[in-house]
Each structure stands twice: as structure tokens, then as C-alpha cells.
Image: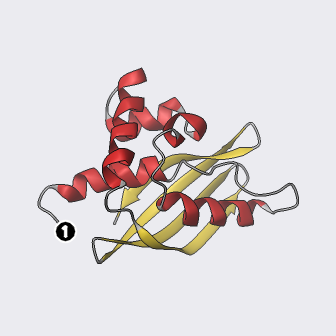
Amino acid sequence: MRSGRRPALAAVVAWSLIALGACGGDGDSDEDRIRALLIEAIETTDPSSCSELASLKSLERQSGLEGEAALRQCERGVEQAADDPNTDARVQRLELDGDTATAEVSFENEGKTERATVTLTREDEAWKLDHVRLR
């Protein structure tokens, strides 16, 4: 991995994981929707996903910035990742507890397997990213 890229990778993964929070049909279980969200969203290259399904609070916490600045940082991170997107996303473990979920995920980034712990919350019937921590 390129020098200095790992700290930015956590932000990009966090931003990427928001992309498909409302994914899944009406008949899908929460677990199915979350698994689909995590697998697909890790690989997103669409910067507009930042504003669609992440709470501003989550973006602010991940970036250390406030308001529009947090949103713009997310969009820049996803744009930068588009040249070398994450691949081979897998959900290793998923635990649901009411309106929260915690998942262990893995993915390939620049030929190296990365792992992250992802916390999601349900807001207005859609699952949204709450926190991402690279391990």
C-alpha cells in the first residue's frame, strides 16, 4: 500500500459503505439488506452516495469536520478511490440487535486484504453507516 494511504483508506471505506443503505426489496430481511449493503457499498465509486444515505453525524465523526465540509471530504475520498476500487468484499460476521448492527468485513485494496468493523443503525427504516474502524 502506498505510504500515507492507510489513514485515508479508513475514510474512503467509511464513505463507501454508505452507498446502499436502503438496498434490498420489501421481502428481504434486515440481515439480507445489511449483507448486500456491505458487500456492494465497499466497492462503490459514486461520490453522490455520501449525501444519500449517511447521517451527517456519521460523516462528521469519521472526518473530524462539520457540515458541508464533512460531506465534501467524503465525496473527494470516494472520487479518489475510483481509480483503484476495493474488490472482493465479504461479510465475515454480522450481529443484529434491534436498530443497530455490527459487522466484520474484509476486502481487497491494492492487492492486500483489509479488515474493518462496521457499525450500522436503522434510521427511518433504512440501515445507515454509523462507524467504521479498520483493523
Which residue lies at the image location 30% right of the left edge and 56% below the top edge?
9
List x then y, in percent, for residue 66.
37, 23
Disc 1 packing (10 Å; few <14; some 14–19; many ≥20): few
Which residue lies at the image location 46% right of the left edge and 52% below the top edge?
16
Q: Is residue 114 visible?
A: yes
Which residue lies at the image location 70% right of the left edge and 54% below the top edge?
23
Question: The N terminus lies in which quarter of the figure?
Answer: bottom left
Which residue lies at the image location 68% right of the left edge and 61% below the top edge?
96
Question: The C terminus lies in which quarter of the figure?
Answer: bottom left
Q: Is residue 66 visible?
A: no
The image shows residue 29, relative to residue 55, as above or below, that is: below
User: Which residue sits furthest top?
Assistant: 67
Asked whether, in this view, residue 55 is left or right of residue 108, the answer is right
Asked whether, in this view, residue 100 is left or right of residue 71, the answer is right
Q: Secondary structure at mark 1?
A: loop
Asked whether, in this view, residue 50 is left or right of residue 68, the answer is right
The image shows residue 111, relative to residue 37, as above or below, that is: below
